[in-house]
Amino acid sequence: MTEPTTRRGRSPEGRAGMRRDLTRAAVELFTSKGYDETTVDDITAAAGVARRTFFRYFPSKEDAISPDHDAALERVAEVFEAAHPGEPTASLVLRAGETVLDMYAEDPELSVRRFRLTAQVPALRDRESASVDRYRRLFTRHLRRRFAGQPDGELRAAVVAASVVAAHNLALRAWLAGGAPADGLPGCRATFHRVVDLLPPEPGEGKGLDGLDEVAERLERVVGRLERTAAG
């Protein structure tokens, strides 16, 4: 008697594989046929699955090209929730941000093609911008809890979260724009890690509001560079 086999899409590995296949089909079609000209039916036909299967994974064709941000956000949350209360904030936010870099590094070729399409299609750019804000809000929420009851805790959480997400995006987009070479990934991580120099000191160690104001000014410059990179 043969053992029953798990249908593809029922196991976590199967679902991840199906999602990748749908995303690859969408990328291929958006590139060759054009975003506006491609339909969900085109994507499902190319992937060899039923239309209803597509909607189990994505609510729309715009979402089909996005990384699995829901899973990435869960991993970020897990890092915060499992962290020791005494871990330095800089170490914690770097570890959390690294999990998102890892997601893009799992399939650099696909990540680059997705990045280039996103830069060309306004609807995809808007969707990606919205996802960036989800990361900022998640970091802010967890950091707010970490700084609860501390002087300037709310402001500190907002500044650290925005700084980390902006630096992460700046480093990631530079790596992807360069073709995401394997030997460029350490440099990407190093660029991201430089955000530590922009963060305010730990509560009780630093300069209070004056220090936060200085960090906010630096953050504005980083965000300005990020926006210019995205526009180019």
Image (cartoon, rainbow, N blue to C red):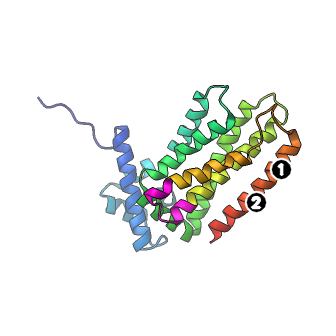
Look at mark 1 in the image and give the residue it sits on.
214
* Magenta span: chief secondary structure: helix
Give neighbour class at mark 1: few <14, some 14-19, many 20+ (Cα, 10 Å).
some
Q: Which residue is drawn at 71% across and 58% down?
A: 222
Q: How many labels does the image show?
A: 2
Q: What residue type is labelled 2?
A: Arg
- The magenta stretch is 174-185
Q: Distance between the residues labelled 1 and 2?
A: 11 Å
Is residue 184 rendered to the left or right of residue 231? left
- Given residues 186 and 55, the one toward you in this image is 186
Does 141 sit above or below residue 63?
above
Q: Residue 221 carries which label?
A: 2
Percent of width and height locating residue 37 = 45, 73
- Residue 111, above or below 209: below
Q: Residue 20 carries which label?
A: none
In the shown orientation, is residue 39 left or right of residue 62?
A: left
Lower sequence index among marks 1 and 2: 1
> Quick one: SS at disc 2?
helix
Q: From the viewer's perspective, is residue 151 above or below residue 124?
A: above
Magenta segment includes 178 = yes
Q: Say which quadrant the C terminus sits in.
A: bottom right
Name which residue type carries label 1.
Glu
